[in-house]
Image: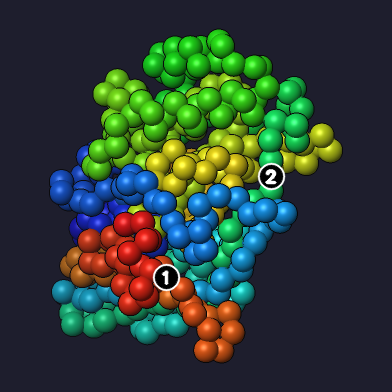
Amino acid sequence: MNRRDFLYAGAGVALTGGAMAALDRRSHPMAAPDASPPAYSVIPVVGDGRWIWTEPPDGETGYLEPRPYDLSVGIKLEGTGDAGGVTSTTAAPLDYPEQKIESVKIETIGCQARLRRLADGAGQLVLTAAEIAKGQVVSAVARYRLTLYKQYHGYGADNFPAKQKIPPDVRKQYLQDSPGIQTRSKQVRQLTAELTSGTPKHPWEQVKSFADWVPKHIKPQIGSYTSVTAALDDLRGDCEEMAGVFVALCRAIGVPARLVWIPNHTWAEFFLVDHKNQGHWIPAHTACYSWFGWNGAHELVLQKGDRVQLPEKRKLVRLLADWTQWSGAEPRSQYTAELTPQPNEPGGDPGPGARRKDEKGEWKVVGGHPLDRLVRR
C-alpha cells in the first residue's frame, strides 16, 4: 500500500485568501519548484482616504467602519483510481477583535468535514473520506458571513509601562524561534544591539525603530520565502521576510511578536501590556502599507502566529498549507476560496476588494468596482 502526502503547489499564497501557504517549499519533497510565494505584496499602497485610510481618523478610536463579507473556503477531490483513508485540509479563518464570524455553514458531497482550531490563531477546514473511486468527486465548502473592521486605538509609548510583565503563556508561544525566524541568530543579535543603542529604553520606541529600519534597508523582492538570516545577509525579501525580520527583532528584546497572514500579504503584530495589566496585540506594517500601531484597510485574516503544530505531521510549521493524504491512487486536488464584499444596507456600495483564489493558490482581485485599482495585489 502506497501512502503519501501531497502539498498543493499553490499553497504558498495561502488563504491569504484561501489555503495558507507554506511549509518551506524548497525543503518539501512534493513541492513544486516554481510554486507561487506565500506572500508578496511589497508595492506601497496609498489608498483613497475612504476605503483605505491614508491617515488615522480624527476623534475616533476602536474597531471602526464595519464591512460585511461573504467568504467561501473549499476542497474538491476527484478520484483517479481507488483511494482510501483520505484526509485533506485547507486554512480557515477564526474570530479576532477586527474580524467577527457572524455565521458559518459547511456543505459536503460524498465526504465528512469539520472546522478545527490548531492554535490560538490557526484554523482549518478538514475533509475526510473513507474511500474515493475513480471518477468520483467529493467536496466540502465552508460558507461564512464575516464582518471586518479597521482599527485605530491611538496607542503610543504613554499607554504602556517601560517595564513589561508579559503573561507566561504569551512568553512561551511568542518569544521563541519559529521555522525560518531565527530569533537567536548572530545577525539578529547584532542588529538588535545596533538599533537599540541610541533609542529610549521604552519598548514602544525600540519596536518603532525596528519597524522604521526594515523597509528602509531590506529591498523588496518577490520570491519564495528564505529566512530571517538570509534576508539580513542579502538585505532583500518580500513582505514575509520583512515582517519576519521585525518579529525576530522584537522577540530578541523580549517583546512578543507574531506574523499575520492575509490574502497575498503578511504583516506583524507585537504584544504590550498597558498600565492596567491588560495585554494588547498591536499591528506593525513593514511592506505595502506603512501604518504602525493601526490598520486602515479591511483585510481577511487567515492566520495569526508562526509556530503551528500539525497533528498529522508532528512538526511545527510557520504557515498552514493546503494538504492531502491518501493511500492508493492519488486524487486530483483543488482548493478554492472567494471573498465577496457586501453592502452595509440594501442598494448600498459594497466597495472594492473582491478576491478569488486561483488554481495556483493566488488570490486575484476579481471585482468590477471602480476603486479596485487601489487595492493591493
| Crowding at mark 1 (Cα within 10 Å: few <14, some 14-19, many 20+) | many
Q: Give the residue type at disc 2.
A: Gly
Disc with the residue nearer the chain's start (2 vs 1) = 2
| Crowding at mark 2 (Cα within 10 Å: few <14, some 14-19, many 20+) | some
Q: Which residue is mark 1?
A: 352
Instruction: Using residue 198 as the reference point, say whether residue 354 is left or right of it.
Output: left
Res. 244 image quadrant: top left
Instruction: Look at the image and tell me whether residue 262 can be seen.
Output: yes
Q: Which residue is mark 2?
A: 154
Instruction: Using residue 74 as the reference point, say whether residue 204 is left or right of it.
Output: right
Instruction: Look at the image and tell me whether residue 130 can be seen.
Output: no
Most foreground residue, 116 or 86:
116
Res. 321 image quadrant: bottom left
Q: Position of residue 62 (x, y in %)?
A: 70, 55
Res. 168 image quadrant: top right
Which residue is at a point 69% across and 44% down the rendered structure image?
154
Q: Give the residue type at disc 1.
A: Pro
Which residue is at a point 45% across and 60% down the rendered structure image?
48
Helix, strand or loop at mark 1: loop
Q: Position of residue 152 (x, y in %)?
A: 64, 51
Most foreground residue, 319 or 311:
319
Most foreground residue, 234 or 215:
215
Q: Quadrant of the N terminus?
A: bottom left
Q: Position of residue 317 (x, y in %)?
A: 41, 43
